[in-house]
Image (spheres, helix red, strand yellow):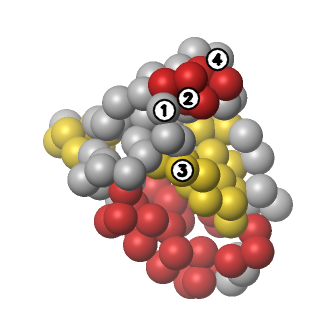
């Protein structure tokens, strides 16, 4: 299962979700394999060990760290790729991880 987690108002959620949809289509993963979870508040974030917005989980493991989350953060998430900081998960990382999916 692929899960996209975000909260409303996150400036990077829309672009990351578009990247995820595009790559899923490219590698032949159907939309039925995607669960989209809106995290409305810190209480729910703690309940699901939310890592921040946006987050992509593959079979429960964070796409960026490769491990199942143990703690939570209810904030906008910032990633580092090739020395650059961004809130958008790039297609290249999503593709590399989804090719190994299932």
Q: CA distance from mark 1 to mark 2?
A: 6 Å
Foreground mark, 1 or 4, reads 1
User: Which element type, helix, strand or loop, lies under badge 4?
Assistant: loop
Provide the residue designation for mark 2: 45
Q: CA distance from mark 1 to mark 3?
A: 9 Å
Tell me, yes or no, whether the two marked residues, 1 and 2, touch with CB atoms within 8 Å.
yes
Q: CA distance from mark 2 to mark 3?
A: 10 Å
Q: Nearer the viewer, residue 65 or 37?
A: 37
**Counting residues from the N terminus, which is met first, the one under dot 3 or under dot 4?**
3
Quick check: 54 above or below 14? above
Provide the residue designation for mark 4: 70
- Residue 56 image offset from top left, x and y in percent: 55, 49
Position of residue 84 in the picture relative to residue 22 (left or right): left
Q: Rate crowding at label 2 as few (under 14), some (14 to 19) or many (20 or more) other CA atoms within 10 Å.
A: many
- Residue 22 image offset from top left, x and y in percent: 48, 79
**Counting residues from the N terminus, which is met first, the one under dot 4 or under dot 2?**
2
Provide the residue designation for mark 3: 38
Quarter of the image where one finds residue 34: bottom right
Position of residue 51 in the picture relative to residue 85 (left or right): right
Quick check: 51 above or below 99? above
Q: CA distance from mark 4 to mark 2?
A: 12 Å
Mark seen at residue 41: 1
Q: CA distance from mark 3 to mark 4?
A: 19 Å
Which residue is painted at 45% across and 55% down in the image? 93
Quarter of the image where one finds residue 26: bottom right
Is any atom of residue 45 visible in this view? Answer: yes
User: Which element type, helix, strand or loop, lies under badge 1?
Assistant: loop
Q: CA distance from mark 1 to mark 4?
A: 18 Å
**Counting residues from the N terminus, which is met first, the one under dot 1 or under dot 4?**
1
Foreground mark, 4 or 2, reads 2
């Amino acid at each position: 299962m692929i899960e996209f987690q975000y909260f409303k108002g996150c400036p990077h959620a829309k672009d990351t979700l578009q990247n995820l949809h595009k790559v899923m289509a490219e590698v032949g993963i159907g939309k039925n394999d995607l669960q989209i979870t809106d995290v409305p508040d810190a209480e729910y974030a703690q309940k699901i060990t939310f890592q921040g917005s946006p987050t992509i989980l593959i079979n429960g493991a964070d796409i960026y760290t490769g491990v199942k989350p143990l703690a939570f953060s209810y904030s906008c998430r910032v990633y580092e790729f090739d020395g650059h900081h961004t809130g958008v998960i790039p297609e290249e990382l999503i593709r590399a991880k989804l090719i190994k999916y299932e």
